[in-house]
Image (spheres, grey):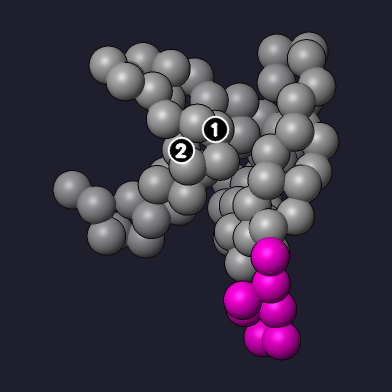
């Protein structure tokens, strides 16, 4: 993985019909893309689910942070 320590990359995603940008390191983009593929749903749909979950938190994190935490929890690292 030549880009393991690559700087974050900004990409546009659509959530609830609205475009927004998310900045993640390439390793996280690959992980969220694999997660969407394994669930047979579009990437935007998975990010929208994560967005909805984060907004239910008492102190919602930013979307990029929520995606990272979600990926970490899916790996079984968060209880």
Residue 34 in sight: no
Of residues 5 and 28, the one drawn nearer to the viewer in this rendering: 5
Residue picked out by circle 2 = 66
- Choose top left, top right, bottom left or bottom right for residue 22: top right
Task: Tell me the residue at 18%/48% (across/down).
Answer: 79
Instruction: Answer above or below: position of 47 versus 79.
Output: above
Specify the segment rendered in magenta. Answer: 1-7
Mark 1 surroundings: few (<14), some (14-19) or many (≥20) residues within 10 A: many
Task: Tell me residue 75's x, y (percent).
Answer: 37, 60
- Identity of the residue furthest to the front in this view: 7
Task: Tell me the residue at 38%/55% (across/down).
Answer: 72
Query: Helix, strand, or loop for circle 2?
Result: helix
Query: Helix, strand, or loop for circle 1?
Result: helix
Tag of residue 42:
none
Residue picked out by circle 1 = 63
Decide: marks 2, 1 in contact (CB < 8 A)? yes
């Amino acid at each position: 993985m030549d880009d393991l320590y690559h700087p974050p990359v900004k990409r546009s995603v659509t959530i609830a019909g609205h475009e927004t940008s998310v900045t993640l390191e390439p390793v996280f983009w690959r992980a969220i893309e694999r997660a969407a593929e394994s669930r047979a749903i579009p990437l935007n749909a998975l990010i929208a689910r994560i967005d909805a979950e984060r907004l239910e938190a008492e102190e919602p994190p930013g979307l990029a942070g929520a995606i990272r935490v979600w990926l970490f929890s899916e790996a079984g690292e968060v209880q």
